[in-house]
Amino acid sequence: MLVIAALAACTGGTIAAFMPGETVTVQGVPFTVSDTGRGVTVRNFETGFTDPALLLSYAAIAAQRVTGCPVTTITKDTGVNTYRAALDCPPS
């Protein structure tokens, strides 16, 4: 029981606080969004109970909230909760 409680404490928003990027929550799921120069990297720290397709759409929402730019494409890295998003931002 202690192991489960310890693992639960190390998930979600707790982990997001230690990751690079801006932290944002979409429908209760924490993400970090980091600029990559060609778009953004979005990481999620959900514990495995949310549908992967829904997480992909939440990752796109997280990217748009942080950057203010529409997401043109988003893909998930194989086997990890990391997404790569291309953006359509106006020139600065």
Image: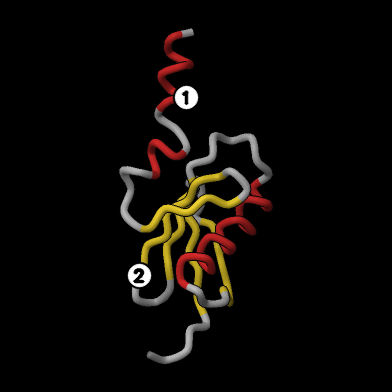
Q: Counting other residues with Cα less than 10 Å from the Cα at mark 1, is it few (<14), some (14-19), or many (20 or more)?
A: few
Give the secondary structure at mark 1: helix
Q: Is residue 36 left or right of residue 45?
A: left
Residue found 40% across the figure and 29% down from its top: 10
- Amino acid at pointer 2: Thr
**Pick the front one: 74 or 21:** 21
Q: Mark 2 sits on what residue? A: 36
Residue 13, placed above or below residue 72: above
> Which x, y percent locates residue 54?
67, 51
Q: Mark 1 sits on what residue? A: 8
Residue at the outermost bottom position: 91
Give the secondary structure at mark 2: loop
Residue found 46% across the figure and 58% down from its top: 42
> Which x, y percent locates residue 63?
50, 65
- Amino acid at pointer 1: Ala
Instruction: Please give the count of numbered marks on the rendered protein.
Output: 2
> Which x, y percent locates residue 23?
42, 53
In the rendered view of the protein, which quadrant contains the C terminus? Answer: bottom left
